[in-house]
Amino acid sequence: QVELVESGGGLVQPGGSLRLSCAASGNMANVNAMGWERQAPGKQRESVAVIRDDGSTTYADSLKGRFTISRDTAKNTVYLQMNSLKPEDTALYFCHADRLLGKHTIVLAWGQGTQVTVSS
């Protein structure tokens, strides 16, 4: 069983930055990718970014250039650096741990979510 704990959310002004962290623990043997999703009020949950064991990354097209996903494998921690934040980035951000099998993704665990609010 994998457990994920997010941190780093908060209130930030437009144009500011935040770094989210997701610390994973438990049996990581089947995890070969981790990522972030977000859900804004009244909107569907959307994928933000994914990082795979080989270091490759995928981003939502609308977030490329502003958000960066990275990892510290020694600490089993994934980060999401968010720059030039906009009010529309306000959402609850969830970390997830996955098993990628070819074209299929099995989500093994979700974090509890961390709130990001961008407002002046």
Image (cartoon, rainbow, N blue to C red):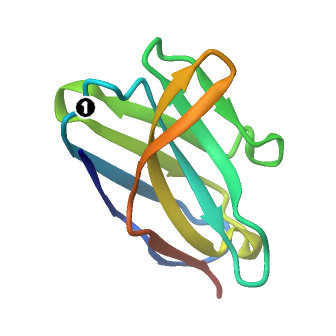
Q: Position of residue 93 (x, y in %)?
A: 53, 64
**Identity of the amino acid at label 1?**
Met
Q: How crowded is the residue under tag 1: few (<14 C-alpha within 10 Å), some, or many (20+)?
A: some
Q: Is 32 located above or below residue 34 in the figure?
A: above
Q: Quadrant of residue 73?
A: top left
Say which residue appears at 24% left-offset and 35% top-offset.
76
Q: Is 84 located above or below residue 103 in the figure?
A: below
Say which residue appears at 62% left-offset and 73% top-offset.
91
Q: Is 88 located above or below residue 45 in the figure?
A: below
Which quadrant of the rendered structure holds the C terminus? Answer: bottom right
Q: Position of residue 63 (x, y in %)?
A: 74, 47
Say which residue appears at 60% left-offset and 55% top-offset.
37
Q: Position of residue 87 (x, y in %)?
A: 73, 76
Q: Quadrant of residue 72?
A: top left
Nearer to me, 59 or 53: 53
Residue named by callout 1: 28
Q: With 120 as the anchor, is 113 left or right in this view?
A: left
Say which residue appears at 66% left-offset and 66% top-offset.
15
Which quadrant of the rendered structure holds the N terminus? Answer: top left
Q: Position of residue 100 (x, y in %)?
A: 53, 24
Nearer to me, 11 or 59: 59
Q: With 8 as the anchor, is 91 left or right in this view?
A: right
Q: Secondary structure at mark 1?
A: loop
